[in-house]
Amino acid sequence: MARSLVVMFGGLCLVLSVGCGYSTSRPFSTDIQTMHVEMFQSKEFRRELEFRLTEALIKRIEMDTPYRIAPPDTADALLSGEILAVENRTFGSDFETDLPLEIGSMVIVRFRLKDMRTGEILVDRPRFVYQASYIPPAGETFTQGMTRAMDGLAEAIVESMETEW
């Protein structure tokens, strides 16, 4: 009995050490080492959204990809884009005050990733939609909701670069 337990434990250790061939590294292109993120443009009249999105993209690229951020003249690839629209919708309202219980925001952007060495467009998304929400009764403001939305949008853009490239 003790010997069979040792054999089973040894077999389990062997299986766990060998693994199943999967990698935890994300499938980003290996021929690009550096990337420049241009300041996103904006058609919205809300100030600073383009700054927040550009900053969130740079942070997300540095955290989640093998790429380094570089100046435009030395970068292998260039990420550029524009905020096309931010639309808000109210979900429910308080019966007594008629104030919104939750506000859903939809941010629509377009972006392009270009290989600066060859001029090839690697990713081109003319309409990329991201949705977020915030809760005014809990003290959340539009600014806080948009900060969270820009962070989530940056993550979604980087993920789309990974899957489409």
Image (tube, rainbow, N blue to C red):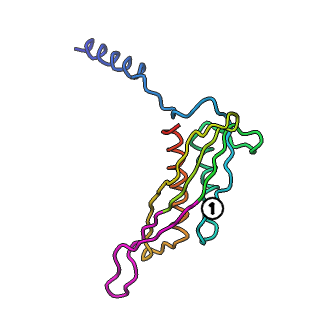
Nearer the observer, 164 or 51: 164
Three-letter code, disc 1: Glu
Q: Quadrant of residue 65?
A: top right
Q: Give neighbour class at mark 1: few <14, some 14-19, many 20+ (Cα, 10 Å).
A: many
Left of 80 or right of it: where is 165?
left
Q: Assess whether residue 97 is covered by the magenta stretch.
A: yes
Q: Which residues are magenta?
A: 83-106
Q: Is residue 28 above or below residue 160?
A: above
> How many marks are shown on the rendered structure?
1
Nearer the observer, 47 or 128: 128
Residue at the (54%, 42%) spot, across then down: 161
Residue at the far bottom in the pictured view: 96
Which of the image's four quarters has the N terminus? top left
Left of 49 or right of it: where is 71?
right
Residue at the (34%, 76%) spot, across then down: 92
Task: State the residue position of label 1.
Answer: 50
Magenta stretch: dominant secondary structure: strand
Residue at the far left in the pictured view: 1
Q: Is residue 4 above or below residue 39?
A: above
Nearer the observer, 70 or 96: 70
Nearer the observer, 51 or 72: 72
Residue at the (50%, 44%) spot, across then down: 160
Residue at the far right in the pictured view: 73
Q: In terms of secondary structure, where does tag 1 sit?
A: helix
Q: Is residue 134 above or below residue 27?
A: below
State the image coordinates of residue 147 (x, y, percent, origin top left): 55, 63
Q: Assess whether residue 81 is covered by the magenta stretch.
A: no
State the image coordinates of residue 135 (x, y, percent, origin top left): 43, 71
